[in-house]
Image: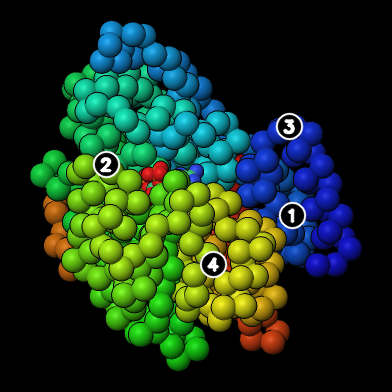
């Protein structure tokens, strides 16, 4: 980056941190995008004059609200709800809802900011938002989760709508929670619309939406590997997480001929030297989705597997690493270990799972490395396909949705190649994704005037 662009980044970040003190995840996400797009912006001075990036980094609207609910003991509980509506430049606000005790304004803002570029990359007309609550669904009864979701939606419903803002799932929000929130929205508004995505298949959901993020991440990684004439076939894959994204990343990796070595949750990881095959994965899905159990139980059931409490899986030797749990779950040290162990490809299923230092390690070692906003975009893209099906009041087949998903992931990969290929031929997918995502949003913002 030349000095002028560097000065622009430094000034921008100084202003942003002063204006948004303490929001470290938000600062991290903005800085990553800014470092990619600054050279492009200084080459196109009108983007500077119009303060396009300054505007994207200031959400259009932030809603913070009280969520009171009664637990099973009859005690009053109070949580905090959020919806950060970052950008409506290219379509209605769109993005997931996260229920996790760590949820705060910084995390909501980083996710909504990232979503802006991700949704732009999908090729579909979707703006960007993120929402959630510091509510912890772990250990809560179904009735408690339902009462919480109803209270959350009672407030949120006045801020969303099928042409305004269309939420979906994220950490701690799956089919059960979407169902309770949809039911409450329908009751309060007397409308059966596509106001949420990730709906059940019998009431407006799309085939393949549950699978889409994990599958899409594997499709994207396959496209990266194909640039080297390589594929998943015969590769050892290390996956973190054991939720929605991790489960279907594992399933697709298996279908593509890979061997899945690990999965994890926030308490530790399991390593299975024989590989987690289809049958073992079905056990994990039942354990996590139906019994809401812990990953350590895998090692009780399969004696060949080992459980590592309070550890992350990155020390296990692999060809492909797929972080699919949460932000900043893979640091510099762990990145060095992966590289030293011969890893050739890192595809992010989660949002911002690798720290900036880890990304630097991967890029210096010339690994195939994709940021979440490119490789995990299949989830929101399939949400976009769910919105299309809701609008035309039709349901496509699984095959039709899968074909669309594959095409979209290939298109995102192409966009990354276009804007991210460096002089020596190395593809900087971070730069490619950020610039491609930015250009479309910037053009729409210029057309709309100063709004
Ligand atoms: P789930 O709630 O289904 O699963 C989350 C998994 O990550 C669980 O195994 C969970 O373990 C683990 N995890 C969560 N928080 C932490 C933490 N602080 N430390 C360690 N492990 C943690 O969520 P998803 O699979 O939907 O989401 C995973 C990631 O993918 C997130 O970054 C999300 O933003 C991103 N994403 C999700 C999309 C979707 O469509 N669902 C789309 C695109 C991105 P535990 O059970 O112990 O909490
Ligand atoms: O981070 C994400 O892209 C999601 N959680 C999915 C959002 C969506 O609207 O499907």
The answer to the question of whether label 4 and label 2 lie on touching residues, with beta carbons closer than 8 A, is no
Q: Nearer the viewer, mark 3 or mark 2?
A: 2
User: Which residue is identified by label 3?
Assistant: 21
Q: Quadrant of residue 75?
A: top left
- Look at the numbered discs 1 and 4 and tell me whether their residues touch, using CB distance below 8 Å: no
Closer to the eye: label 1 or 2? 2
Circles 3 and 1: CB distance less than 8 Å? no
> Mark 2 — residue?
292
Q: Find residue 86 and report its horizontal and vertical position in percent.
A: 54, 39
Local SS, label 3: loop
Q: Residue furthest bottom?
A: 229
The disc, 3 or 4, on the residue closer to the chain's N-terminal end is: 3
In the drawing, what numbered circle is on residue 46? Answer: 1
Relative depth, front residue between 342 and 316: 316
Residue nearer the viewer, 284 or 209: 284
- Residue 184 in view: no
Circles 3 and 2 in contact, beta carbons < 8 Å: no
Q: Which mark is residue 366?
A: none
Decide which of tag 3 and tag 1 comes sooner along the chain: 3
Calculate the distance from the C-alpha at mark 1 to the C-alpha at mark 2.
Answer: 52 Å
Q: Is residue 298 left or right of residue 376?
A: left
Distance CA(mark 3)–CA(mark 4): 34 Å
């Amino acid at each position: 980056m030349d000095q002028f662009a560097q000065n622009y980044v430094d000034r921008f970040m100084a202003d942003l941190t002063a204006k948004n003190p303490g929001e470290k995840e938000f600062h991290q996400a903005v800085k990553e995008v800014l470092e990619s797009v600054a050279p492009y912006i200084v080459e196109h001075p009108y983007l500077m004059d119009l303060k396009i990036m300054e505007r994207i980094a200031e959400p259009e609207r932030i809603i913070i609200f009280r969520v009171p609910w009664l637990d099973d003991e009859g005690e009053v509980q109070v949580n905090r709800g959020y919806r950060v509506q970052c950008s409506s430049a290219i379509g209605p606000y769109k993005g997931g809802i996260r229920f996790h005790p760590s949820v705060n304004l910084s995390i909501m803002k980083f996710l909504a900011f990232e979503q802006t570029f991700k949704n732009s990359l999908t090729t579909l007309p979707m703006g960007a938002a993120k929402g959630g609550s510091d509510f912890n669904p772990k250990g809560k009864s179904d009735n408690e989760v339902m009462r919480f979701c109803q209270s959350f939606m009672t407030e949120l419903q006045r801020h969303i709508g099928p042409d305004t803002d269309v939420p979906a799932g994220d950490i701690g929000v799956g089919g059960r929670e979407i169902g309770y929130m949809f039911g409450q929205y329908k009751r309060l508004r007397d409308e059966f619309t596509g106001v949420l995505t990730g709906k059940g298949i019998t009431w407006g959901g799309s085939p393949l939406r549950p699978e889409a993020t994990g599958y899409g991440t594997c499709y994207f990684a396959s496209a990266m590997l194909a640039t080297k004439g390589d594929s998943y076939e015969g590769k050892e894959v290390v996956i973190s997480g054991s939720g929605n994204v991790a489960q279907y990343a594992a399933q697709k990796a298996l279908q593509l001929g890979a061997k899945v070595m690990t999965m994890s949750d926030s308490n530790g990881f399991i390593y299975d030297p024989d590989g987690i095959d289809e049958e073992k994965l079905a056990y994990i899905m039942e354990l996590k989705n139906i019994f809401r159990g812990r990953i350590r139980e895998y090692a009780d059931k399969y004696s060949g597997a080992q459980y590592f409490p309070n550890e992350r899986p990155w020390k296990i030797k692999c060809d492909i690493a797929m972080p699919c749990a949460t932000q900043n779950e893979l640091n510099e040290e762990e990145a060095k270990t992966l590289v030293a162990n011969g890893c050739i490809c890192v595809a992010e299923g989660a949002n911002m799972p690798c720290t900036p230092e880890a990304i630097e390690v991967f890029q210096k070692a010339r690994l195939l490395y994709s940021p979440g906003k490119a490789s995990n975009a299949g989830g929101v893209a399939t949400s976009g396909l769910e919105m299309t099906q809701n609008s035309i009041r039709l349901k496509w087949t699984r095959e039709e949705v899968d074909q669309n998903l594959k095409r979209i992931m290939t298109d995102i990969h192409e966009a990354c190649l276009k804007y991210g290929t460096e002089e020596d031929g190395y593809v900087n997918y971070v730069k490619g994704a950020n610039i491609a995502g930015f250009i479309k949003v910037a053009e729409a913002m210029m057309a709309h005037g100063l709004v």
